[in-house]
Amino acid sequence: MDIQGLDYNTEREKMRLKAYGRDIQQMVEHAVTLPTKAERQRCAEDIINTMKRVVPSQQSYKERTPMLWYHLALMSDFKLDIDYPVEFEHEDKMATPPEKIEYSKQSVPVRHYGKLLFAMFDKLKEMPEGPMRDALAQETAEQMYRSLASWGFGSVNKERVVDDLARFTNGKIQMMPDEVRISSAVSMNQKATTKRKKK
């Protein structure tokens, strides 16, 4: 049914930023049409004050100001000719896609230990015997246990940890299972995980 004088949102021009509503969008469109720069500037400042009230924020006004002025420019399709108190990128520059980030192609023999642990294995292979290496070996063993527990493997035990530690350090680190100290928090977390799986 077509009723004269009524217009529907589906028939209206699409809003740039829905959060501020159609009234502010219309205020911005009006500001663009004002004949003098002084009038446009005053109108823009009034719109900014209204935007602050319509969309409140936890940020301070100083922190929020650049975003508000950028949103104003965006709603005007960057056609509002005023002196902006902040600098921002024009829309055409923003539309340029960022350069593609190349992902590391380095692989690890077993994914559940990850690159960090394999870096620690490499470090242990290079270190001379002594208390520093022993301490790092203990930290590495605990992290290995934590990783095995996090990935949900059924056989999370110290025997597996020391076997893997010896294998991935080319036999440089040889520990007995009872030498591996696991913090109580890690042990409790592993027990809780096992209990959940049994249910």
Image (tube, grey):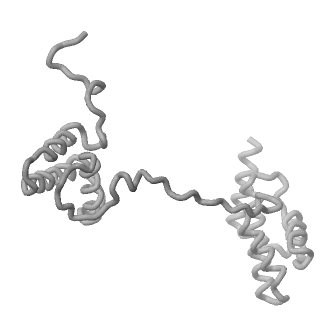
On the rendered structure, is 145 left or right of 53? Answer: right
* In the image, farthest residue toward the top: 1
At 71% from the left and 46% from the top, the residue drawn is 196
Q: Quadrant of the N terminus?
A: top left
Residue 100: give x, y in percent of width and height. 57, 57
Q: Quadrant of the rendered structure where residue 171 is?
A: bottom right
Q: Quadrant of the rendered structure where residue 164 is?
A: bottom right
Residue 189: give x, y in percent of width and height. 69, 58
On the rendered structure, is 74 left or right of 131? Answer: left
Residue 18: give x, y in percent of width and height. 30, 40
At 25% from the left and 61% from the top, the residue drawn is 65
At 20% from the left and 51% from the top, the residue drawn is 80
Residue 186: give x, y in percent of width and height. 70, 64
At 21% from the left and 22% from the top, the residue drawn is 7
Question: As displayed, is residue 49 above or below residue 185?
Answer: above
Question: As displayed, is residue 12 above or below residue 144?
Answer: above
On the rendered structure, is 60 left or right of 199? Answer: left
- Residue in the foreground of this view, choosing between 93 and 86: 93
Total numbered labels: 0
On the rendered structure, is 42 left or right of 65? Answer: left
- Residue in the foreground of this view, choosing between 102 and 164: 102
Q: Quadrant of the C terminus?
A: top right
